[in-house]
Image (cartoon, helix red, strand yellow):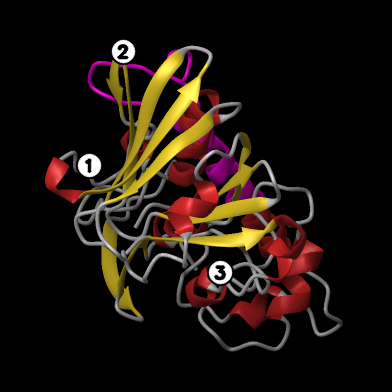
Amino acid sequence: MPELPEVETVRRGLAPVMEGAVIARAELRRPDLRFPFPDRFAEVVTGRRVLALGRRAKYLLIDLEGGDVIIAHLGMSGSFRVVEERGEAVPGDFHVPRGKDERHDHVVLHLQAEGGPRRVIYNDPRRFGFMDLARREALTEHPYLRDLGEEPTGNALDALYLAARFRGRSLPLKAALLDQKTIAGLGNIYVCEALWRAHLSPERAAGTLVTAAGKPRKELSLLTEAIRAVIAEAIEAGGSTLRDHIRADGSLGYFQHSFSVYDREGQACRTLGCKGTIGRIVQSGRSTFQCAACQK
């Protein structure tokens, strides 16, 4: 599933295309994705100017003139591509390549902008993504957004914040970090990467990183720094080729080339001086990659 850095890269790729443009026509090629489209979805968005593209956790937020906001989630296989006179591009590169089979083009937004007409196409072979509508003033109370925790990109995510949520908890550290009510948008890949950087076992109880007085231990401070760093680096890698969003191959970043632990089962640990090997375990049905020699 696309994680926060990939979704942020998509947002950055779509923003120069969509912001300021008018949705001349919204074409829905089926009645539903993961869920049915909201009533009158196409009618509501048609004729509206796109004011801004935002992101909350793994959700894209398309802010429209008139106060409505499109909430879009990519699910497991969803992606956007842009078609205009200069060519075609896919905004964002993923660990698993996105599809461009036109049979799975389910939503087409026909835009009119100063640079001429263009189409933003949502493609989703497995149809686990979805789109919804919300009023801007009620956005923070929307069921998808209201219970989300702090973003891993802002200053609000610090060791004190995590200590308050980890205190007394026997939940494995990886599961605690994947809880979207604690950290919004943090997914399996980057949890593995952050835990490796902090030299912490994914099976360790979250509460062991907090003192009896509720203060963060040094390991929790290191983990917080690792989370923020790995997310920042992934976003930077994903957005580093956005100088021109129209590329012949649609590639806009390859952070997966920098993975240190994820999907490296059987390979040597990259921690300096460590002679361990990356292993894989399964936690809550998901693969976890770790070095048992240096992650404690």
Q: Position of residue 83 (x, y in %)?
A: 31, 25
Q: Is residue 175 left or right of residue 216?
A: left
At horizontal 72% and vertical 77% (from top left) the residue drawn is 165
Q: Position of residue 219 (x, y in %)?
A: 66, 62
Q: Looking at the picture, which amino acid does disc 3 mark?
A: Leu
The label shown at residue 215 is: none
Residue receiving disc 1: 97
Indicate which label's residue lies in the foreground, 2 or 3: 2
Q: Position of residue 101 (x, y in %)?
A: 13, 42
Gap between marks 2 and 3 measured at Cα = 44 Å
At horizontal 67% and vertical 67% (from top left) the residue drawn is 149
**Nearer to me, 185 or 161:** 185
Q: Looking at the picture, which amino acid does disc 2 mark?
A: Glu
Q: Can residue 280 be seen? A: yes
Q: Looking at the picture, which amino acid does disc 1 mark?
A: Pro
Position of residue 256 relative to residue 212, above or below, is above
Residue receiving disc 3: 177
